Image (tube, rainbow, N blue to C red):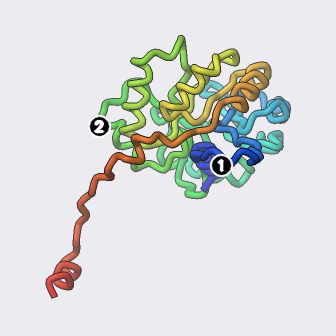
Amino acid sequence: MSKLADKIRKVTRTQSQPLGFGSARAAAEPTLVLAARCDDASSAADLARKGADVVIVGSARAPATPSAAASVKDAIAGAWVPGKAAGEAKAYADAGFDFVVFDPDRTAAIALLEEDAGYVMVLPPDLGDAETRALESFHLDAIDIGAMDGPLTVRKQIDLRRLFAMVRKPLMTTVRGDIAPAELQALRDTNVVVVVAEDAGAVERLRKTIDALPARRRHRESEERPTPLVPRTVGLDEEEGDDE
């Protein structure tokens, strides 16, 4: 498991309220992963000091080099990769990057054969429903849905819930540094787990907003909803054993 995947798992855990009047509330864990994007690896350490949990080096226009991993300290490091050569993911993982970010329209399949690396895929805008559902079988730590332009409307919430229902992968999106806490919480409720800041100022503001968000709560209706039984294929020997 990549460090990014482990971080996502931790922030998505639900928390229960402490019992008793005298219970001291422990420091709440953040409920979103804060990532920062930078083209220059030399600024990665500063972004980590300002509060970024994750630093993504490079972009689609200017992918990172494996040697850039040495500049990222005290944060989980990810890298945009060119996606052209065989074994690229392994080269970046060996250099110290925890995960790679790739564009599926440009990246060769032979570049992503390293099982120990984490993967974040940028979602193409023209994927049909059948192609989107196929993503559920891919080994992906998160899916980058791009920037959240404009306010979060109910229609956008529906679209995000629909996307998650098909892919069953954590969602990542770029947000403004001055996004309202209520809107950030609403994004969290639509299965956005990683928010990306574009500069150091946005990192500082988002760090404070994320840390002040209320803890995740388990929805009561989800506890009472029955779990559907999924039929499974039974082998011939098992069927005969049941008959006996």
- Is residue 99 visible in the rendered structure shown here? no
Q: Is residue 167 left or right of residue 115?
A: left
Element assignment for label 1? loop
Around disc 2, counting alpha carbons within 10 Å, would you say few (fewer than 14), some (14 to 19), or many (20 or more)?
A: few
The quadrant of the rendering that contains the N terminus is: bottom right
Q: Amino acid at mark 1?
A: Leu
Mark pair 2, 1: CA separation: 47 Å
Quarter location, residue 204 = top right
Q: Amino acid at mark 2?
A: Ala
- Residue 93 in percent (x, y) is at 67, 51
- Residue 228 in percent (x, y) is at 28, 52
- Kindly check if marks 2 and 1 are in contact, taking CB atoms under 8 A apart as contact: no
Q: Which residue is mark 1?
A: 19
- Residue 60 in percent (x, y) is at 60, 28
Quarter location, residue 178 = top right
Front residue (pair 23, 79): 23
The outermost residue toward the bottom is 244
- Residue 79 in percent (x, y) is at 67, 38
Element assignment for label 2? helix
Which is more N-terminal, label 1 or label 2?
1
Front residue (pair 197, 41): 197
The quadrant of the rendering that contains the C terminus is: bottom left
Q: Is residue 10 left or right of residue 104?
A: right
For residue 228, above or below residue 46: below
Q: Is residue 68 left or right of residue 157?
A: right
The outermost residue toward the left is 243
The outermost residue toward the front is 21
Q: Residue at x 44, y 48 (%)?
A: 138
Q: Which residue is mark 2?
A: 130
Q: Residue at x 14, y 83 (%)?
A: 243
Q: Residue at x 47, y 31 (%)?
A: 123
- Is residue 104 visible in the rendered structure shown here? yes
